């Protein structure tokens, strides 16, 4: 795995420096023959080297399009694409074109594609099938943090700093992302970024508390080398498209629709490119 780690770090650095990356380059870094390196990469990444490179480039490009004032041609050039090639690669990855994202056109397509857990039909591109799962009933839980709605605030930098400070002071390495329904029609969602709430700990005054009632949950774990966003989406895809079909004695509990996306500090070890994610789903036994 150490050689594999080197390959991931090498790819990241080359992308950031707008440099070409060949399969031979990656093999040389790993110290393997090119054919053997390709097999190893396919095993761990569930995709070939060039597909992984394309997806990482598109992830970086997405950030550039959203956060920078660069035009699309410059961003395409930065990642070594022609204008047409960049548009095709971006649409293949995200379902919309770069210009639609820039103009905020059809952004509901992006939301539908990536917030809808059924989007990734072939979860095996990102994770292997989760073999182990845990079903347990948990008493009421309290979480404290901020949501996507809060992040729209002009004070986002302060809010982010406060969140980091809260985690450090409370020595709470676990962070959660809670996706929950805002309206009765189940069309509006919010995501709540939080730590467990415990009395007498330090919390910024503007942070909110969410209570989650007693509930039966299934916890699914998986790992991969892609962004956590894709790993989480793949876990959701597996749950909705595979797990529920195999375990017909259970169904999703629609009374309180919420999913926990949980990460520990160890998941972000700089020496380990593997992203490990855990997602909880509310379930109940069929009557």
Image: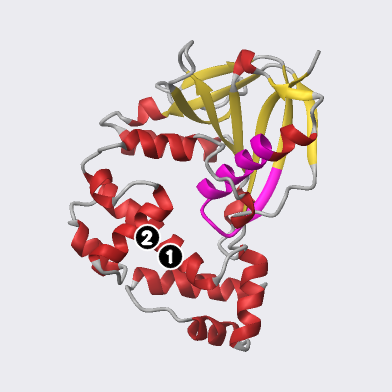
270 or 230, which is in the foreground? 230
Of all residues, the one furthest to the top in this rendering is 184
The answer to whether residue 88 is left or right of residue 272 is: left
Where residue 22 sits, quadrant-wise, is: bottom left
Whether 183 is drawn above or below 153: the answer is above
Q: For the point 54% across and 87% down, which residue is it?
A: 28
Q: What residue is drawn where x is 70% and y is 44%?
A: 221
Nearer to me, 203 or 115: 115
Residue 172 in sight: no
Q: Is residue 117 above or below residue 143?
A: below
What residue is shown at x 45% (from left), y 39% (from top)? 113
Location of residue 155 in the rendering, given as x and y in whole percent from the top left corner: 29, 32
Q: Residue 202: horizontal and vertical position, in percent?
A: 52, 27
Q: How would you classify the magenta stretch by its main secondary structure?
A: helix
Q: Which residue is mark 1?
A: 54
Q: Which mark is residue 81?
A: none
**Residue matched to label 2:** 89
Q: Secondary structure at mark 2?
A: helix
User: Which quarter shows the C terminus?
Assistant: top right
Q: How is the image coloured?
A: secondary structure
User: Do the numbered discs 2 and 1 sit on residues whose CB atoms are within 8 Å?
Assistant: yes
Cα–Cα span, label 2 and label 1: 7 Å
* Residue range of the region highlighted in magenta in the rendering: 221-241
Residue 148 against residue 174 in the figure, above or below: above
**Residue mark closest to the camera, 2 vs 1:** 2
Q: Of the residues under marks 2 and 1, which one precedes in the sequence?
A: 1
Query: In which quadrant of the rendered image does the N terminus lie?
Result: bottom right
Q: Residue at x 69, y 54 (%)?
A: 128
Q: The residue tagged with tag 1: helix, strand or loop?
A: helix
**Residue 132 in the figure: left or right of residue 1:** right
Q: Is residue 193 magenta?
A: no
Name which quarter of the figure residue 242 lies in.
top right
């Amino acid at each position: 795995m150490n050689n594999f780690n080197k390959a991931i770090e090498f790819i990241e650095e080359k992308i950031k420096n707008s440099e070409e990356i060949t399969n031979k380059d990656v093999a040389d870094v790993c110290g393997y023959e090119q054919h053997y390196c390709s097999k190893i990469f396919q095993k761990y990444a569930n995709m070939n080297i060039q597909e992984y490179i394309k997806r990482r480039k598109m992830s970086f490009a997405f950030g550039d399009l959203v956060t920078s004032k660069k035009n699309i041609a410059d961003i395409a050039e930065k990642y070594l694409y022609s204008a047409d090639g960049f548009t095709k690669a971006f649409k293949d990855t995200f379902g919309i074109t770069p210009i639609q994202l820039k103009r905020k056109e059809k952004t509901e397509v992006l939301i539908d594609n990536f917030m809808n857990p059924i989007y990734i039909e072939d979860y095996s591109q990102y994770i292997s099938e989760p073999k182990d799962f845990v079903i347990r009933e948990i008493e009421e839980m309290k979480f404290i943090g901020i949501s996507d709605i809060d992040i729209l605030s002009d004070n986002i930098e302060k809010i982010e700093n406060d969140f980091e400070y809260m985690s450090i002071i409370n020595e709470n390495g676990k962070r959660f992302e809670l996706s929950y329904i805002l309206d009765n029609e189940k069309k509006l969602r919010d995501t709540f970024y939080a730590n467990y709430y415990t009395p007498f700990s330090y919390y910024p005054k503007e942070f909110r508390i969410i209570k989650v009632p007693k509930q039966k949950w299934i916890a699914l774990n998986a790992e991969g080398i892609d962004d956590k966003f894709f790993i989480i989406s793949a876990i959701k895809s597996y749950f909705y498209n595979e797990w529920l079909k195999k375990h017909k004695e259970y169904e999703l509990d629609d009374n309180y629709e919420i999913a926990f996306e949980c990460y520990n500090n160890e998941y972000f070890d700089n020496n380990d490119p593997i992203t490990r994610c855990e997602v909880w789903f509310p379930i109940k036994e069929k009557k």
